Image (cartoon, coloured by chain):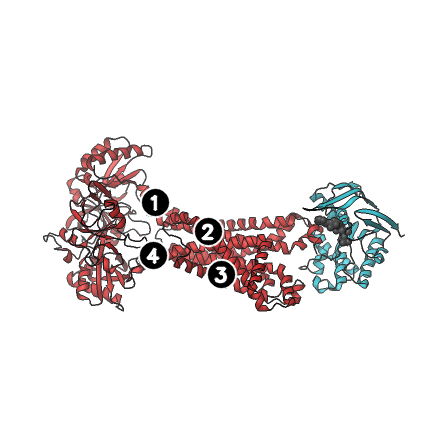
Chain colours: A red, B cyan
């Protein structure tokens, strides 16, 4: 039985080549798209889940309530971990992790390497997390605080085949570090990713005991460290956070910590949620799951539509089989076989497709997904899609096709699904509604990206290059003078911040009339040279700005938002104390975007200070290369040991939005695929309609119908359906996209033309699809269709 | 009205070449009722299709109303056809999705007759073929004879000069067949030229002249009147 079915199915597929091709190609492309999307989703969801403790590890975020607005930092002070372990029994283990900024160059026997990802971590790092050591002792990875653990790749880079253990690396912080272990390279789906791990306790050496903060374990003011807690199973993470906040208050009293809470975020959420646990990247994961489901649904609709449309042609065959004696069950299995066979072939084609596009996909998505169809999780994705398609598209038609009433079907009348033209119409409307929503989505997302890129940042980002100065810092004036003499250099300035990513903030600010509620006021600090505002084209809206006199060291410039939050009237000339230095507000700077546009502009201060490490060189479009050459020359002079790493501001800007652009691109790709698949389905449906109406078309032509008349007769119905889809899709798309755009504080407007364009595109695509078949049918010689009786 | 000379039609498929019409010459005068007979496959339908401007000949001349139409293009043929020729087929070829009324109305729509006129004319012919009471039924709801009467009504609604009928009684019993034949005779008497293909000697006797064909050629002609 199975074999006969198989043979029959195969013959059927070959006999109806267009039908089979449309079905298989449509399904294969959709399955491929769906699987690619789910692989992406799976990769995103797999982040940090490879730790066997991942369910019990939390990262602490520090949250300050400030006039109803939450201020959340993903770091905590260092002592939090120490107290947590000492005082809270439910905390089984802790580990502090942070970037090691003080080291950027490491040298071994004359071989120098820059840009290793260097991290600092507590000794618990290798037991609490699953970062296995190839060499060394995971329980005691560091023998002293100058120990380092290298990744396999890094070790190989430095030492080749030699045994790394005990080797000495010289760092540019003038210290020598010795290797005590080698770890496996950290996987790509890890939020914590370093090449080299230094001992966290080395930070203790930065404290002399004479400053305000006496030691690392008493420094409650520096929120630079990621604190991970391993909680005992069943522990209430929220309570742990509250207890830690109380401990913090006990050690550092005052207004600032009054509203402090610690929020433990599960490690598995670190990648996709904000530090406090709100949706972040997970939104896109959800969107992509929905898109995958839509694609699968549309593919299934295509299948159901084609199969049932074809049922009209097969009615005779099916009825004959019934009259001869086939029972319902047998027929049901035959149709299911057919579906299964088509799906399996489609799956093979899809696998080949995925293999083909995987490198490109990884590049667009910025991922390193290795596709192996036999891997457990890939098989799972396959299984899910197969099950879904079989349920959605296999069983339903099989059931309804096998329940024809044979005598009626013999006469060309259909009972059951095949007869329900309305049902097919609904399906077409569903798939086109989705397609239109995706088109609208594509345009809006594109618009939003464009909006962000074209947004006036409040400063000039054209023809500006910048770089970290290193040793130039000490010879800034000489280097600047030298640079200004070079062709192509228009102006030079310096700052302690990256103007696009200024993240340094402090609560150490005071002014007359600061209220109790304003005690938690936090301000972003940007140290700068006097000419910084001029060179960057930052606008002063009140006051004069820096004066050029020594008084500038206490002349503070605040942005509009800061003034508003502090609620100071007539701010210019008012007293302002910053880091305990009394001064005055010398000017108000028009708000500018010193962080990415996903964030609202916050209070910021620009202050004159020699603490500057980033040089900004202004040039012209024409002479940019000359300016680069000049900078390189100066660089070699002061930093012979380091490579120059400069970036143009506008490139840096694009880098900031790389992941937005990526998501945008992915969304585009999948939206296009969805629309193509919908059209393929429409194409198939029109083909079948034309075929089933071939006699009618013949008769009409004999009676004098013109070719355009026939084409419009065939197209009208379908275009009407597309029209209905548009009416359904627009409000839904409008609602969904307004919702999505809400996550951007600075966003494009959803204007009517987007909908007009989407409607036009859809109609045009549908029209082309339909008319292709309709014209073919209309041009056919009626004699042929009429003689075949 | 129709004069064809040395008409040839050859069907070519991958393996075989079928000469459907072989230097066929026929003349049909205005007002005539001609029957064409012959064994299956001798080319009767092919001839009728060419006469009806549905198909074009490979060679020969075809003069219709004093105009050479053998090499007319598709659009010209369609135009000539819809104003001058009505068709009746063995298998009725009514459109299942349209009612009796709508089926008959169709040719008028295609020739651009106004809606009010259409209604009048359709009712006229439906009356004539005595199917008026069934005007809102669908084809499947009618008997074969009734369906063919509708088809005849549709063929004549445009008042064509020529009606081409391919075995109009082929699917009907003798009673229904006779009804259709009488209808045709009546139309002929009112001035419509009719060319009819048939296998039935009985039906052929309704005509004025029988043309007998064999292998794409005429063999004999019997004049009955
Ligand atoms: N489209 C076609 N392709 C190939 N051969 C064809 C085609 N149409 C007709 N023929 C061949 O041409 C010959 C004449 O066919 P035609 O249909 O005119 O016969 P007929 O006299 O009407 O027969 P019947 O009485 O059975 O209707 C036949 O041999 C037929 O097989
Ligand atoms: Mg015939």
Foreground: disc 1 or disc 3: 3
At a point 58% along the width and 62% down the height, the residue shown is: A4
Closest to the observer, A228 or B216: B216
Point out which mark residue A674 bears: none
User: How many other residues sit within 10 Å of disc 3, few (<14), some (14-19) or many (≥20)?
Assistant: many
**Residue, disc 2:** A352
**Residue, disc 4:** A280
Q: Earlier in the sequence, mark 2 or mark 1?
A: 2
> Do marks 2 and 1 both belong to one polypeptide chain?
yes
A450 sits left or right of A253 in the view: right
**Residue, disc 3:** A389
- The chain ID associated with circle 1 is A
Residue A409 position within the rendered picture, expressed as x and y whole percent measured from the top left: 65, 64
Residue A514 position within the rendered picture, expressed as x and y whole percent measured from the top left: 20, 56
Closest to the observer, A434 or A82: A82
- The chain ID associated with circle 2 is A
User: How many other residues sit within 10 Å of disc 1, few (<14), some (14-19) or many (≥20)?
Assistant: some
């Amino acid at each position: 039985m199975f074999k006969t079915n198989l043979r029959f199915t195969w013959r059927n597929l070959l006999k109806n080549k267009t039908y089979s091709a449309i079905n298989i190609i449509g399904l294969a492309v959709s399955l491929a798209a769906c699987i690619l999307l789910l692989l992406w989703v799976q990769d995103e969801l797999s982040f940090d889940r490879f730790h066997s403790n991942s369910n019990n590890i939390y990262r602490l975020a520090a949250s300050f309530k400030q006039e109803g607005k939450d201020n959340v930092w993903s770091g905590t002070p260092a002592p939090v971990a120490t107290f947590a372990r000492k005082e809270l029994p439910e905390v089984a283990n802790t580990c502090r992790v942070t970037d090691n900024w003080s080291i950027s160059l490491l040298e071994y026997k004359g071989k120098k390497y820059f840009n290793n990802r260097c991290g600092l971590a507590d000794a618990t790092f290798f037991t609490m997390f699953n970062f296995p050591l190839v060499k060394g002792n995971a329980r005691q990875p560091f023998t002293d605080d100058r120990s380092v653990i290298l990744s396999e790749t890094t070790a190989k880079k430095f030492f080749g085949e030699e045994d790394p253990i005990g080797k000495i690396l010289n760092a540019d912080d003038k210290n020598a570090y010795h290797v005590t272990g080698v770890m496996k390279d950290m996987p790509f789906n890890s939020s914590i990713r370093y090449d080299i791990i230094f001992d966290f306790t080395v930070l203790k050496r930065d404290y002399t005991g004479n400053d305000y903060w006496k030691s690392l374990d008493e420094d409650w003011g520096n929120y630079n460290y990621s604190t991970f807690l391993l909680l005992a199973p069943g522990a209430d993470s929220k309570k742990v956070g509250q207890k830690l906040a109380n401990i913090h208050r006990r050690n550092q009293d005052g207004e600032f910590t009054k509203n402090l809470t610690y929020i433990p975020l599960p490690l598995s959420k670190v990648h996709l949620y904000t530090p406090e646990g709100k949706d972040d990247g997970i939104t896109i994961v959800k969107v992509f799951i929905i898109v995958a489901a839509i694609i699968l649904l549309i593919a299934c609709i295509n299948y159901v539509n084609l199969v049932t449309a074809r049922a009209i042609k097969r009615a005779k065959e099916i009825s004959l089989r019934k009259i001869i004696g086939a029972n319902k069950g047998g027929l049901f299995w035959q149709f299911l076989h057919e579906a299964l066979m088509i799906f399996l072939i489609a799956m093979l084609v899809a696998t080949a497709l995925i293999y083909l596009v995987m490198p490109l996909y990884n590049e667009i998505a910025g991922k390193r997904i290795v596709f192996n169809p036999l891997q457990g999780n890939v098989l799972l994705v396959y299984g899910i899609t197969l099950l879904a398609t079989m349920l959605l598209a296999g069983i339903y038609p099989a059931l309804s096709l096998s329940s024809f009433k044979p005598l009626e079907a013999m006469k060309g009348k259909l009972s059951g699904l095949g007869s329900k033209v309305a049902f097919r119409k609904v399906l077409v409307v569903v798939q086109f509604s989705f397609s239109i929503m995706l088109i609208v989505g594509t345009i809006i997302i594109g618009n939003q990206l464009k909006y962000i890129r074209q947004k006036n940042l409040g400063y000039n980002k054209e023809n500006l290059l910048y770089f970290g100065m290193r040793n130039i810092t000490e010879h800034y004036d000489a280097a600047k003078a030298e640079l200004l003499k070079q062709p192509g250099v228009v102006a030079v300035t310096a700052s302690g911040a990256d103007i696009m990513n200024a993240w340094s903030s402090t609560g150490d600010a005071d002014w007359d009339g600061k209220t109790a509620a304003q005690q938690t006021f936090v301000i972003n600090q940007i140290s700068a040279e006097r000419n910084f505002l001029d060179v960057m084209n930052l606008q002063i809206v009140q006051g004069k700005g820096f004066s050029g006199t020594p008084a500038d060291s206490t002349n503070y410039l605040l942005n509009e938002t800061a003034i508003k939050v502090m609620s100071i009237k007539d701010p210019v000339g008012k007293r302002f104390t910053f880091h305990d230095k009394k001064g005055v507000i010398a000017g108000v700077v028009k708000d500018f975007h010193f962080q990415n546009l996903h964030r609202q502009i916050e209070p910021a201060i620009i202050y004159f200070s020699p603490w500057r490490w980033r040089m900004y060189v202004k040039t012209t479009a024409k002479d940019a290369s000359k300016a680069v050459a000049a900078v390189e020359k100066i660089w070699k002079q002061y930093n012979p040991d380091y490579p120059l790493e400069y970036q143009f501001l506008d490139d840096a800007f694009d880098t900031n939005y790389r992941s937005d652009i990526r998501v945008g691109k992915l969304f585009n790709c999948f939206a296009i695929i969805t629309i193509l698949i919908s059209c393929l389905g429409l194409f198939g449906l029109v083909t079948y309609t034309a075929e089933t109406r071939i006699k009618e078309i013949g008769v009409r032509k004999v009676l004098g119908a013109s070719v355009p008349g026939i084409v419009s007769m065939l197209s009208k119905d379908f275009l009407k359906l597309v029209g209905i889809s548009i009416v359904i899709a627009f409000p839904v798309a409008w609602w969904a996209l307004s919702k999505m755009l809400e996550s951007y504080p600075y966003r494009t407007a959803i204007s009517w033309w987007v909908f007009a364009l989407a409607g036009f595109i859809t109609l045009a695509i549908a029209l082309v699809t339909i008319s292709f078949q309709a014209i073919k049918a209309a041009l056919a010689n009626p004699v042929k269709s009429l003689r075949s009786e | 009205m129709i004069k064809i000379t040395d008409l040839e039609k050859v069907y070519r498929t991958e393996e075989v070449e079928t000469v459907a019409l072989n230097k066929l010459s026929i003349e049909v005068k205005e007002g005539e009722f001609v029957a064409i007979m012959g064994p299956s496959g001798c080319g009767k339908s092919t001839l009728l299709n060419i006469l009806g401007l549905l198909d074009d000949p490979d060679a020969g001349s075809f003069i219709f109303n004093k105009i050479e139409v053998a090499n007319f293009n598709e659009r010209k043929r369609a135009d000539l056809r819809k104003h001058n020729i009505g068709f009746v087929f063995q298998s009725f070829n009514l459109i299942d999705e349209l009612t009796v009324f709508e089926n008959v109305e169709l040719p008028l729509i295609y020739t651009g007759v106004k809606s009010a006129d259409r209604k009048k004319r359709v009712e006229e012919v439906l009356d004539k073929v005595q199917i008026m009471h069934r005007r809102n039924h669908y084809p499947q709801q009618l008997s074969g004879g009734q369906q063919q009467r509708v088809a005849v009504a549709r063929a004549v609604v445009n008042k064509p000069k020529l009606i081409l009928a391919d075995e109009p009684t082929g699917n009907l019993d003798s009673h229904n067949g006779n009804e259709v034949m009488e209808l045709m005779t009546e139309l002929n008497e009112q001035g419509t030229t009719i060319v009819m293909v048939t296998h039935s000697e009985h039906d052929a006797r309704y005509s004025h002249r029988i043309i007998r064909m064999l292998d794409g050629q005429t063999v004999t002609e019997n004049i009955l009147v």
